[in-house]
Each structure stands twice: as C-alpha cells, then as structure tokens.
Image (cartoon, rainbow, N blue to C red):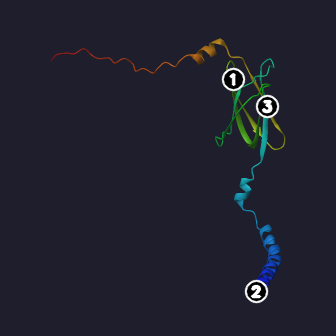
Amino acid sequence: MGWKYLKRSLSVFALVCSPIICVALATQPRTFAQDAQAVSRVTLSGTTKSADGTPIPGATLRIIQPETGQTYVTWSDEKGNFDLRSIPVGHYRIEASQLGFQDVKQEFDLTVEKPTVVPVTMKIATLEAINAANQPQAPATAPPATTAPATRP
C-alpha cells in the first residue's frame, strides 16, 4: 500500500504544480542584460573586381568594426564573390588586398533594413609599387660617431 500511495501522491503533485511552475517562469520579466545580448546580425556580401570589371579571385578581405576592433577575415572565390554571415549591425571598414593590385579601404554601414552588398574595385598596381613592396627594408643605422682629435694638455 505504501508504494502505490507514494506513486499516486507524486502524480497528483506533478499535475498540480507543473502548470503553476510554467506560468511562473513564463511571466518572469526580461533583464537588461538579456536585451543587450539580442544584437541583430546580418549577412555581408560583395564582389572584388578590377577597374575593367574582371573578377579578382583570392583577394583577402578584412572587415573591421572600428568601435570594437572586432575583425572578420574572408577571401573572394573564383568569381570574385565573398560573403560573411552573422555579422552584428554597425559601422565597418573593409580592407581588400591581392598581389598585383593596389590595396583598397572603404567604409560602410550594416543595417537590418536591407541586405548589404559591398562592391570592391581594385586597381592594378604599378610596377614601381610592386618593386617597392618587394624591397627589403634597410636596417636603421645610427649616424657615425664624431670624435674630436685627442689633445694633450
């Protein structure tokens, strides 16, 4: 008799208390910290092309949020396309680089109102710029020491 009574008591307790607990949890107010964590995130996409419209595959793209310093890195595919998913909305700077092309920097805003597509147009680097980038840096040298001739007293 003891086991059946305990089993029945637990069943009644579960039936009576479950709805009360659910209602209590559902009506808890949200805290400010929970609201702050609800940051909207969007997808950023774009293309890397040369000035004549030719796609630039393999370009390195750094997307930087200046306020936080958060940096995302991606590369363009064989058609020059790139995309980054789940980026928080805000103001960003994109820095694109590829061997043989001049580096590009531009700023843009990510918003939830519309999809953000960033076209990146890169100019072909000049031969002087390529050569300058490939030259080793000269070591810093101290100016030659000047000494006065020794004089006898």
Task: Please give the residue where the numbered disc 3 appears in the rendered image.
Answer: 46
Q: Identify the secondary structure beneath mark 1.
A: loop
Of residues 124 and 76, the one nearer the viewer is 76
Give, as a three-letter code, the residue at label 2: Gly
Q: Compute the Cα span from label 2 to label 3.
A: 71 Å
Task: Please give the residue where the numbered disc 2 appears in the rendered image.
Answer: 2
The 10 Å Cα crowd at callout 3, few under 14, some 14 to 19, many 20 or more, is some
Give, as a three-letter code, the residue at label 3: Gly
Q: Residue visible at 70% across and 58% down?
A: 33
> Image quadrant of residue 64?
top right
Give, as a three-letter code, the residue at label 1: Gln
The x and y percentages for residue 7 are 79, 80
Of residues 101 and 143, the one nearer the viewer is 101
> Image quadrant of residue 147?
top left
Task: Please give the residue where the numbered disc 1 appears in the rendered image.
Answer: 98
Q: Residue visible at 79% across and 31% down?
A: 46
